[in-house]
Amino acid sequence: MIANPEFQNQPKMFWAYIRTLSQHLGSTVRGEGQIKIPTLAEMCTGLGELGLDPRKIAAGEEKPTDLGAELHKYFGYRAEVLNGFVESQLMNAEQAQALYDELRKKSKYECPTPMNKQKGEKAKPAYFTGIVNTLIASSTKGAECNYSPMKLTTVTRDGAAVRTLSRRIDGAFPGVVNPVALWEIKEYYYTTTFGSRIADGVYETLVDGMELEELREREGIDIKHYLMVDAHETWWELGGRPYLCRMVDMLHMRYVDEILFGKEVVDRLPILAQEWMRLVAERG
């Protein structure tokens, strides 16, 4: 999923309203399993309950200001893309395993597939990570790639360190020193509750995105940043839908370049990997 350009140049204040209203009004329709689109009246009521001025978004009961109209339009877009596209892309464990087995049989290139962090009967290969790694290896014909960096990402220029990111990420192309692309993978097939560990993973991606934004704005160095997400039950049924909303917000705030949901990786990763190859070739 790429961002809708219509919402990419919104000021930080716009996203303050999106986050505030999403938190206060809720992101989902209770009992229906769908992402919510608050009405103008609901947004005004919510702002009033929070001690904020509803007149910033509405000149009357049915007369939105420019800000109010944009907020309502974005809420509608976010709900449409999540309800209509993202849910259909997310796989369960059985579907992910079948896709993983299919891709591994076709691939001529070796790449790692780590185990998940579950125990007992739930201890399995990390299927989505294996799918991602296999697609990258096949698309780049086995080119250099760090599929599991155990070091912090570092950016250098003329023999000097420019930035070192705060967190270890899940993958870097071609490596963790001066990469052209970084990615993070969030797959949780066998969890039974949506806990803080899963929620924290979303915020970790946000921190990385903020550091990369600062690098881009201050140093003119652009590193592509991707988030790859799967597990239908976890993200859609166990309480993850508000966090999917936050991911879509993060995409439009330009903290990630693209989010790949579930089986979407099959079509998009080969295209992205070829772009990474081109970027590496251009810098020599």
Image (cartoon, rainbow, N blue to C red):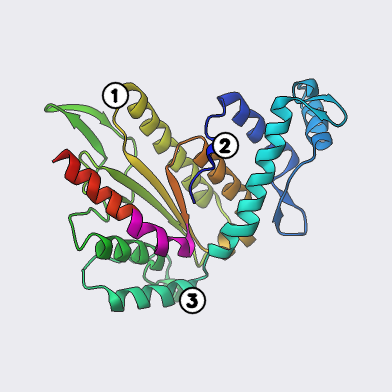
Majority secondary structure in the magenta region: helix
Toward the viewer: 227 or 153?
227
Would residue 239 be visible to someone looking at this image? no
Amino acid type, mark 3: Glu
The mark closer to the camera, 3 or 2, is 2
Q: CA distance from mark 3 to mark 1?
A: 44 Å
Do tag 2 and tag 1 residues touch (Cβ < 8 Å)?
no
Amino acid type, mark 1: Glu
As helix, strand or loop, the secondary structure at mark 1 comes to: helix
Q: Which mark is residue 6?
A: 2
Q: Which mark is residue 139?
A: none
Q: Which residues are magenta?
A: 261-271
Q: Is residue 109 above or below residue 178?
A: below
Q: Is residue 25 left or right of residue 189?
A: right
Q: CA distance from mark 2 to mark 1?
A: 26 Å
Q: Is residue 17 above or below residue 133?
A: above
- Which residue corresponds to mark 3? 94
